[in-house]
Amino acid sequence: MFRFIIIIIFVLTSSFAYFKIKNILPDTFWVKPAYNLFFLIIITLFSAGVFLREYLPLHVNTVINNYSVTWIVACVYFILVMLFVSTINVANKYFNILPFNTGQIEIKRIITLSALAFIVLIMIWGRYAFNNIKVEKLDININKNTKIETLKIVAASDLHLGYSIDKKYLKKIVDLINSRKPDMILLVGDIADAYSQPLIKQNMKEEFLQLQAPLGVYGVTGNHECYGDMENTVDYLKSAGITMLQDSSVLVDNDIYIVGRKDRTLKNRKQIDELLQNIDKQKPVILLDHQPFNLNQAQENGIDLQLSGHTHGGQIFPFTLITKSIYEKHHGYLKKNNTHYYITSGTGGWGPKLRTGSQSEIVEITLRFGTENQK
């Protein structure tokens, strides 16, 4: 079903771009045949990526997948820009706001080529924002006494490892996390894009095992693991040195609780109060919950810090506007009474390796404990 939807989106967006650009091409004998051949190659590669994914070599699959989804985004932006141009044309027809006739073929050519150049710039910026992972720093005071005064956590979410975001990108993430010298590492869901197979094929375990944190590496699943072979993925991540918390908790260094929820995609997941039944709330409690829905529940149950992801901060504009309207907090820091929240935009991304509505990030959180640290 998902592949069918992707095909429909590809056909509709590509068809619009194909005919819109074809109308402004010169009549030179070789131009239109070359143009048609270009689109035929695009269609062939996309079809191969959709229907032959399981049979193609991994590196071929990766290249096709990356460029196919980027192509779809470029076509969507082209449609949006041309709709804006059409609106201007209609306004010009009735109010004569432009000093030239937009119906002339030369003007149409300039407008269309300018739109294409603008979209290329957007794509370049989007790739830069994706690849240039920033470190978001947070300093949080928690009014609970522990045997340690400070704890440095590095959190990452939405890696979406698979055919598109590969082992090479994972190495970049691991190196960046290790460079922050964290005491603890938290992975907040959608570690895998769906299936475990591409992780296993690329031996991503080798990179995960390089993560360095004296108090351990902990993770939860997100909605995307639920779309694939979740049990196999969880087992693989465990073998890679990650303590996966599936509606469970762990007491770290006999001092701090890490509580991990299953994703809300799974209707049988436990409620927060159930997860906290055997927890001493005199100690700090950190909750990992992939999707940032019903944030009040953490506050009502005495959670000190909740970390979530899922939204990607919108990732691709104008989806930023949608995530802002859906979630109480779609990205960034929030505090409700004594409960702190951080919703990260994520370290990888879903679909194209582009971010035109947000930037890739890891989160470095310094927790300070004890009443004397409170402001």
Image (cartoon, rainbow, N blue to C red):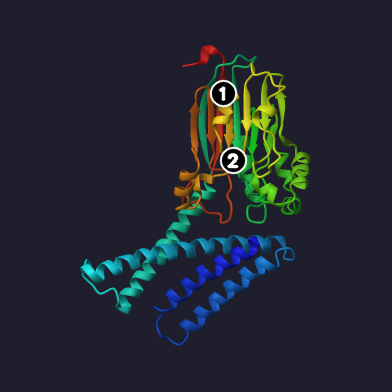
Please provide percent x and percent y for residue 57. 72, 63
Q: Is residue 37 above or below residue 134?
A: below
Q: Is residue 116 above or below residue 318?
A: below
Q: Which residue is mark 2?
A: 291
Left or right: residue 360 compared with residue 209: left
Please provide percent x and percent y for residue 222. 65, 43
Amino acid type at mark 1: Leu
Mark 1 or 2 closer to N-term? Answer: 2
Residue closest to the eye, 38 or 321 = 321
Indicate which label's residue lies in the foreground, 1 or 2. Answer: 2
Alpha carbons under labels 1 and 2: distance apart: 22 Å
Q: In the structure shown, which secondary structural element does the residue marked by tag 1 occupy?
A: strand
The residue lying at 58 percent from left, 34 percent from top is 307
Q: Which residue is mark 1?
A: 367
Amino acid type at mark 2: Gln
The residue lying at 63 percent from left, 52 percent from top is 165
**Residue 55: quarter of image:** bottom right
How busy is the neighbourhood of tag 2: few (under 14 within 10 Å), some, or many (20 plus)?
many
Q: Residue furthest bottom?
A: 29
- Name the quarter where the N terminus is drawn: bottom right
